[in-house]
Image (tube, rainbow, N blue to C red):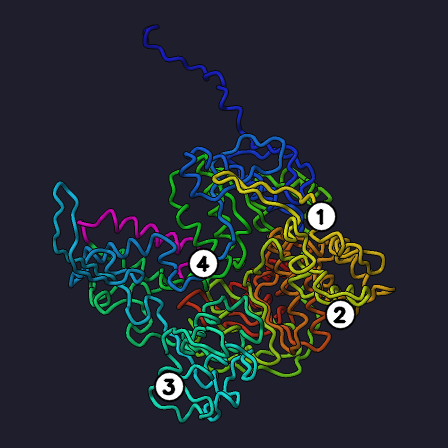
Amino acid sequence: MSKATRANTQSPAPRGGDRHDLIRVHGARVNNLKDVSVEIPKRRLTVFTGVSGSGKSSLVFDTIAAESQRLINETYSAFVQGFMPTLARPEADVLEGLTTAIVVDQQRMGADPRSTVGTATDAGAMLRILFSRLGEPHIGPPGAYAFNVPSVRASGAITVERGAKTTVKATFNRTGGMCARCEGRGSVTDIDLTQLYDDSKSLAEGAFTIPGWKSDSQWTVQVYAQSGFVDPDKPISRYTKKEMRDFLYGEPVKVKVNGVNLTYEGLIPKLQKSILSKDKEAMQPHIRAFVERAVTFTTCPECDGTRLSEGARSSKIEGISIADACAMQISDLAAWVRGLDAPSVAPLLDALRQTLDSFVEIGLGYLSLDRPSGTLSGGEAQRVKMIRHLGSSLTDVTYVFDEPTIGLHPHDIQRMNALLLRLRDKGNTVLVVEHKPETIAIADHVVDLGPGAGTGGGTICFEGTVEGLRTGGTITGRHFGDRAAVKDTVREPTGTLEIRGATANNLREVDVDVPLGVLTVVTGVAGSGKSSLVHGSIPAGEGVVSIDQGAIRGSRRSNPATYTGLLDPIRKAFAKANGVKPALFSANSEGACPGCNGAGVVYTDLAMMAAVATTCEECEGKRFQAAVLEYRLGGRDISEVLAMSVTEAEEFFGAGEAATPAAHRILGRLADVGLGYLSLGQPLTTLSGGERQRLKLATHMAEKGGVYVLDEPTAGLHLADVEQLLHLLDRLVDSGKSVIVVEHHQAVMAHADWIIDLGPGAGHDGGRVVFEGTPAELAAGRATLTGEHLAAYVGA
């Protein structure tokens, strides 16, 4: 080889860019973080752990991911930024080495009735294109197969302004796939008129049975009685057809009642606007109960629940319509798509196959594309969001996951771990907030926050390898190797709850006796039918308190005191002690500071830039008028009480001048679920997922009932918190309650008195009871997937 052609075999000198292998955070002060400084290695799997409320999400989501997103947004023009969410720079001294962050959180998908698994992913769109190309008979473009696109026909004259103005006749046709009867919802609502009024009475006799409608003084009722459209003294059952039509469906029209101009409108449209259009979850309990009685949802008789028009259902590929395809279990749909041979749409088929295979790979093969997205659990919603990232060719991206193992059986956790490692091995930085030891164990780097929660947390307790965590002496390290043992003796049931012939969703005529008076755990792989059995077969009537995974609703004005109802007895106690109105002690009512309207901060809108929040100068962030703060109870004003922790407030309201039994009972329940550190006035928007779950549990514990049904109460809980939850469940059972828990956590399974295991698989491969008995029998038999993992967990 000549000198001219000899290659330089020495390794090149390191370039400047090679030194940026760390994400550096210094002086982070978001929420409860206390000047946190941490260096996170890139292209590694880093797990953030610590007790619920220790600051994990504040560091990962509200600091690192938020700043990455803000910097990306700043690369767009000011015009484009005006249409994007505005983000403030997180409170931190230094944030370096950030890469593009893709956040996969636990936020539930929108519960819009037109949103399905197919519309939330690309699968539905690709399927519509496939049918528009191959479907026979051909009915139109992809929109003709979309249940969100209505058919439109129009004709008329239009004026074209081009040179000399000309008027031309034009027609417009668009073929959509929406069922005209249900408008693409799949179900139609029917109002039960017997729940609205007693037709044997007249309006003057108080025929209305709608909550809050009084016949003597209510303006709404007077409008009907004095409108002139109906006879107020005639029983409703004797109305003529015209009177009944005007009474129920009359168009809005101005009428004069007692000299006042008011609007008369038929009863049905009036109720739809005033009550039925509101969010049911936000209604008062008695209003919600009325709506549930009065409104029935039935499958649309025209489209049979498919949401699609007759034309869309008539077009088929090899005998399968798009409605049939969307109703298939995704694993079966993937097999059907693989069997299609159409060179003209080969790229589309390849992309659709990859997407459907990703569903199966991630453990969601039991879903169907027509499943409403609002019915997905938090864990299922998070995995659906992961679908689009699995086949991505992007590298050097930061993926941020929020407890990806929520809702997963131990068998499925192994699959999730493999996916996280695959994302890392493609050259990405993977940041995971997690509590499960199985996922912590695969980490390259661990950051443990704590030592406590709320104000007791917000510091880095440990940073290093998993082996170092085990011997680090932190709460996580001490509990990392914890294994709950199965009970030597179990409680004897006091009775049984019989379930016969359960067929909800994928259940196959399930017959099972659920023991009462004990702790019963219903388990099985994700999609095996647990929630269908518990929520679909156990009547949520008198005596049954059901605590599901539904999100807590609340704005930055909501806090634990308002959510739990604690503020009501506190306000009354202040009012009684000072001889004034209770409304003065609400920051959302008469006592609010006029400068900030009770928010404590003043927000300045800066258009496309993040709004600036500054502490209100008038009340100094206390949210109340100065005059209100002069009133005291037990030597404390209302702002000082709301700044107390639950533990401090429990002592304050337990004895002495401030003794308030009603408030003390609520505070006791909050302490029982492990929220003693929480501030009474802390905004709900700043609480972690685990804290919100326990706040909901504490609130429902006040309800009268003999049977408690809990859906994955360990979601968001640290290993140490799970131990406290088990003590709480024991106390409930020992007090005479029956507790039924849908759960995957082996510690809860081992602690149970009775286990019902569903399976053996998911979707149509599940829906059967594969084991009934004690945890010890399940672990000893190892006959099911759950049995194998429980045996490994307890070392049987």
Specify the label residue 244 is tagged with: 3
Spatial CA span between label 4 and label 1: 37 Å
| Residue 250 against residue 594 in the figure, above or below | below
Q: Amino acid at mark 1?
A: Cys
Spatial CA span between label 4 and label 3: 38 Å
The prevailing secondary structure element of the residues shown in magenta is helix
In the image, farthest residue toward the top: 3
Return the residue at label 2: 662
In the image, farthest residue toward the right: 656
| Residue 694 against residue 274 in the figure, above or below | above
Q: Amino acid at mark 3?
A: Met
Spatial CA span between label 2 and label 3: 49 Å
| Residue 72 against residue 320 in the figure, above or below | above
User: Front-most of 245 and 104?
Assistant: 245
Q: Would you say 471 lies left or right of 157 here?
A: right
Return the residue at label 4: 110
Return the residue at label 1: 619
Q: Residues within 10 Å of mark 2 (few under 14, many from 20)?
A: some
Q: Would you say 154 lies left or right of 18 here?
A: left
